[in-house]
Image (spheres, rainbow, N blue to C red):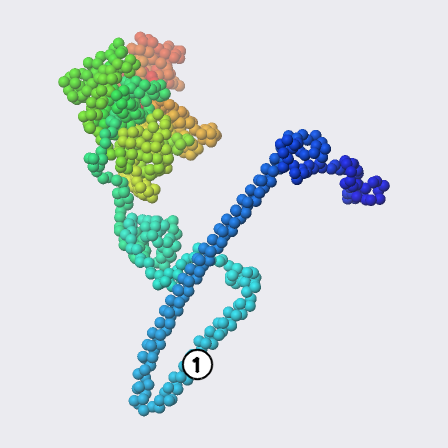
Amino acid sequence: MSDTDGKKPLGLRGGPRSGQVKQSFSHGRTKNVVVETKRKRVVVPKPGASKTGTGAPAGGDASKRPAGISDAEMERRLKALQAAKAREGEEAAERAAEEKRREDDRARRRAEIEAKEREQQERQERARQKAEEDERARKAAEEAARRAAEAPAPAADAAAGAGPAPSRGAPGAKSAPAGRKPEREERQRREQKGKGGDDRRRSGKLTVNQALSGGEGGRQRSLAAMKRKQERARQKALGGAQEREKVVRDVQLPETIVVQELANRMAERVADVVKALMTNGIMATQNQTIDADTAELIIEEFGHKVVRVSDADVEDVIDTVEDKDEDLESRPPVITVMGHVDHGKTSLLDAIRNAKVMSGEAGGITQHIGAYQVTTDDGSVLSFLDTPGHAAFTSMRARGAQVTDIVILVVAADDAVMPQTVEAINHAKAAGVPMIVAINKIDRPAANPDKVRTDLLQHEVIVEKMSGEVLDVEVSAITGAGLDTLLENIALQAELLDLKANPSRAATGAVIEAQLDVGRGPVATVLVQNGTLRRGDIFVVGEQWGKVRALVNDKGERVNEAGPSVPVEVLGLNGTPEAGDVLNVVETEAQAREIAEYRESAAKEKRAAAGAATTLEQLMAKAKDDQNVTEMPIVVKADVQGSAEAIVQAMDKIGNDEVRVRVLHSGVGAITESDIGLAEASGAPVFGFNVRANASARNTANQKGVEIRYYSVIYDLVDDVKAAASGLLSAEIRENFIGYANIKEVFKVSGVGRVAGCVVTEGVARRSAGVRLLRDNVVIHEGTLKTLKRFKDEVAEVQSGQECGMAFENYEDIREGDVIEIFEREEVERSLD
């Protein structure tokens, strides 16, 4: 602010006043700012205010009190001031106490650290003294040994008559330089140490020479390494470190093994194993496979013992121990419902479960194997398996019979025994399981249960009403009649079987169905047969392995474990297993992976061996037979493994000696771009059963002209493939005889040749028809007509009883009395039955 700008200078005297301040900026710019200064009102109570009596005013003299302040307000302010001062005093006391406590803690920690340092120094001093004592003892022992060795030498010299002085002086003369040499080396070492000490001020700095020479600027030892070094020195000082004894291990050696796995089994470093291999002239990394002979050399070189095992021994880890009787507990029975298609299996099971499963199936027929658990009114638990009745699902029914305890054979009272009923009977007999016959649809007007019982006699199934042992129940899934009796019979049969299992052991089970879910990956429906399957268990199933990520029961709820006879969906597989595979729980992932890889390689070798077993003659014969066979290639994708298997089996049955269906690829999951590429290369259509193609696959199919067909009922798929295969059959040529004519006379016409004068004796003669010339009932010519005339006119046909003239195309050896047979050819399309 400038004092010579003509304005009155600002001050702090007096009451509120205003002034102006001139601000200067860069480039010569200025600005005047109005400033107002106010005095702050400060209320200072008098020293005697706090001692004022109750009768006097609290604020003292009212004339000296600030304006507008009442006695009550003044008293409140004084109390607040007193409270603030008291609080400040308390805080100061707390701070002093805290500071004193901290000082005590610091002193205590300092004392502990000093005690530890003193203890460590004493320990090091004791170790150093012991080392010095040991060194002195060792030197004394060496000196004594040296003197004992040198003592006979002077005696021998004295006996020989040599002067003692020269003999004593000579060693002394020679030992003097020897004694001075260590002193000189010690002095040089001290000088070098002193020179290094002069440059201590640069010890923390890194020079270019140090960086280039890799000295102090290089990699420093870690704190852990320094601690290990100090620990080794301490142990050595206290009595010397004992050499750790080598642990000799029994190393199981298969036919081939990965280098890293070999190192793990020997408990050696992988780098040491690779170094040993290189020493033996084998350049192998830790992920490469070596043969058993090479691995045996390495194992013996490391000092371990070799235990040779075969590849099949990897499955020995699967627990096959027999369960003790005291560990066994009762388990629910597994009941499989079997029968012909549309006989009401799923409807009967729905009536028991009070659910509606059949309405969710395409076409109202079951095309998947379903697993459910039902709790009856008396509290007993039953596990049901619902199998398809269609002819294509033979393998599904066979699997259902193998894992079950009781078979319920459902037969419709108005339809009696059908082909799949007979097949279900055979499956039950092959599995050796008891059977209960459920005669369904008794509410129909045409129901005849006695006919069902009579028909079953033909297949050696004798029910109780026929004086047999097989239980039979008349039921109706619609009205619910007979369901209680059926459940009572199931409970009675289960009680007779006395079903038990050990829930405490590792789980084993059977895969009922498997599918590839878009969101969840490979999913397997597993029926636990023994033990308890829990979340986190590592298992191997067929050629696949996995870790149980989740368990889902038949109601769609996630559970943590599944005991015996409980069907669950298992998530966490690395691939889709085959339906019917056995699930076994193992201890480690390495075991599961090893078993799965062994099974996969064994399956590949089996398939390769089956292909290689054919001889060259067989291949040539097959190629010759295939020349006359037309193939229809197809690609099949289904939603579950069982459906894909059933479709492939149905396709194998379609065809005859002229045409057959060839399944290029069948799999589980959505139709992908690779499926379209395979179909395009082979000119095959793609059939999707309850699956769809993804966007990229649809675009590729549209570009390359590959046909994709979707189905949800297996009937339709089989019928369409059968119709398409029938189209590849060559048409059948049929001959329809339309007339006969007798040659009465033969004429020779110029420009035409020999012409037969005929009388049509039967049927009609057509110009476009084919003809055969019969002489003495022997066919001597077959061809077509060149001309057909009645009188002099060319006509299309001649009726029976009329005369006409006929001339054959490129044939003139006709005689009187010959018979002309007139026929027409018709092409008839064939179909596969």
Give the labeled residue for mark 1.
177
Q: Give the quadrant of residue 562.
A: top left
Q: Is residue 99 above or below residue 405?
A: below
Query: What residue do we see at 35% from left, 58% from top?
Result: 280
| Residue 500 position in % (x across, y down) | 22, 31
Residue 6 relative to residue 71: left or right:
right
Identify which residue, 87 or 791, lies in the foreground. 87
For the C terminus, the quadrant is top left
Query: What residue do we see at 32% from left, 22% from top?
Result: 366
| Residue 598 position in % (x across, y down) | 31, 42
Q: Give the quadrant of residue 322.
A: top left
Residue 184 relative to residue 585: left or right:
right
Sort mark 1 into few (<14), some (14-19) or many (20+) by Cα contacts within 10 Å: few
Identify which residue, 476 or 633, lies in the foreground. 476
Q: Amino acid at mark 1?
A: Pro
For the N terminus, the quadrant is top right
